[in-house]
Amino acid sequence: MHLPNHFKRKERRTTKAAALIARELNTLYDGIIVIIVMVVLSSLSIAALMIGLLKRNECPIQPWVPRWLIIFGSVGLGGCTLFIIMGIIKMTCCHSEKHCQIESCFMCGGCLMLILFLYFFAWMITGSVWVFAIRSRVQFEHPLEANYCQKLPDVVLQYLKYVPPQNKLDFTYFLSQLFPQSSIF
């Protein structure tokens, strides 16, 4: 079946428009997925930052452990924020490769992300050395002694161990175990 030239031109334009729309939706979808993943990953950084800030005076045997959490959370949150900003810029400014005018900005952002990743990795090793160096000398029961450190992972494990499965989402109990001196819970 032969179509007249008039219909062939419309068919080509429609195909190009559909391909452009599909490409735009794919870019938007990829950007949204990246942003969602980064928001979820940033929650780990926020948790580390908050725990470090709230428990900063509760580890006299190694005061760098809470500081490590604060810096870990801050750098992780900064990296996630930078990645989210780069994703938003890509979604709004770079609809296709030929329309992307900010490649040098992405190169600088990528280099900064690499530096943050290397720092993050080195900081993880440093924190592990601090934690494992005091592991045999630390105690968790007597907060007034010099070798005390608050044992947050133990509280989390106790929460998961003793709370019935239907109440696992009861964060009030978890927070009351985490902050027993607070009168809110």
Image: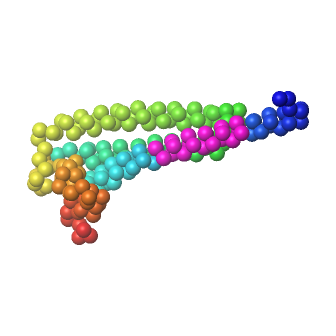
Q: Quadrant of the N terminus?
A: top right
Q: Main secondary structure of the magenta part?
A: helix
Seen from the viewer's position, the closer of residues 124 and 34 is: 34
Q: Quadrant of residue 131?
A: top left
Q: Nearer the viewer, residue 22 or 55?
A: 22
Viewer-proximal residue among 82 and 27: 27
Left or right? Give the position of 175 relative to 110.
Answer: left
**180 versus 4 height, above or below:** below
Nearest the eye: 126 or 39: 39
- Locate residue 32, reporting x and y percent: 54, 45
Q: Quadrant of the C terminus?
A: bottom left
Tell me what residue is drawn at x 69 percent, y 41 percent: 21
Residue drawn 89% across and 32% down?
Answer: 5
Q: Is residue 115 left or right of residue 151?
A: right
Question: Does residue 22 belong to the magenta stretch?
Answer: yes
Residue at the far top in the pictured view: 2
User: Residue farthest to the bottom?
Assistant: 183
In x, y percent, where is residue 101? 69, 36
Q: Would residue 105 appear left or right of 126 to someone viewing this image? A: right
Image point (61%, 39%), residue name: 26
| Residue 52 place in picture, x, y as percent | 30, 51
* Residue in the picture at 86% in, 36% down: 7
Which stretch appears magenta? Answer: 18-37
